[in-house]
Image (cartoon, rainbow, N blue to C red):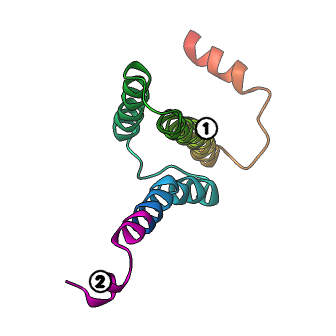
């Protein structure tokens, strides 16, 4: 055994390590929320993974309520559901934003391509007449 643990109350060590673990666990999703915000993107996040994660936390909350767990446990389960909703809102927001941006860029590129095929000179007002006469001939 570790010698310093013998000098300290084992229950205190257990309580301290449990509390430390719980605090880390509470903020486990914070880096993901921050990175999504900082990058303005959710690239690399799977919507299937997020949905499964959200369903897992939702079933945990439902289980806590149905089995009449302690209010603290219900509060923690509710907290995780709220964090899941925040990440899902970020996902929908940034995914929609990126999709609109890609569509805008594609539209801009298609305009540039079609514009590069045209003449640098202003359009000839008689070209429509010429096309009509070609059809008649």
| Picture layout, residue 68 above or below residue 116 | above
Q: Residue at x 56, y 59 (%)?
A: 35
- What is the C-alpha distance between the residues marked 1 and 2? 53 Å
Q: Are marks 1 and 2 in contact (CB under 8 Å)?
A: no
| Picture layout, residue 17 above or below residue 119 | below
- Which circle marks residue 36 in the picture? none
Q: Secondary structure at mark 1?
A: helix
Q: Nearer the viewer, residue 101 or 20?
A: 20
Q: Residue at x 25, y 86 (%)?
A: 2
Q: Residues within 10 Å of mark 2 (few under 14, many from 20)?
A: few
| Picture layout, residue 95 above or below residue 65 | below
- Which circle marks residue 6 in the picture? 2
Magenta segment's dominant SS is helix
Q: Residues in magenta?
A: 1-15
- How far across and how far down the image is residue 95, in percent? 54, 40
Which quadrant of the structure image shows residue 83? top right
Q: Is residue 34 left or right of residue 125?
A: left
* Number of marks drawn: 2
**Magenta stretch contains residue 105:** no
- How far across and how far down the image is residue 94, in percent? 58, 43
Residue 137 appears anywhere in the view: no
Q: Secondary structure at mark 2?
A: helix
**Which corner quadrant holds the N terminus?**
bottom left
**Magenta stretch contains residue 14:** yes
- How far across and how far down the image is residue 110, in percent? 57, 41
| Picture layout, residue 40 above or below residue 12 | above
- How far across and how far down the image is residue 137, in percent? 55, 13
- Which circle marks residue 93 in the picture? 1
Q: Nearer the viewer, residue 105 or 131?
A: 105
């Amino acid at each position: 055994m570790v010698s310093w643990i013998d000098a300290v109350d084992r229950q205190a060590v257990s309580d301290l390590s449990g509390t430390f673990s719980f605090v880390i666990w509470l903020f486990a999703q914070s880096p993901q929320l921050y990175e999504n915000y900082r990058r303005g993107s959710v690239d690399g996040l799977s919507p299937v993974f997020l949905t499964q994660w959200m369903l897992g936390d939702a079933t945990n909350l439902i289980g806590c309520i149905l089995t009449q767990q302690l209010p603290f446990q219900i509060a923690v389960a509710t907290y995780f559901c709220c964090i899941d909703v925040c990440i899902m809102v970020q996902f929908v927001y940034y995914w929609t934003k990126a999709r609109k941006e890609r569509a805008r860029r594609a539209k801009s590129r298609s305009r540039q391509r079609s514009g590069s095929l045209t003449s640098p000179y202003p359009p000839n007002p008689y070209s429509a007449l010429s096309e009509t006469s070609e059809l008649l001939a």
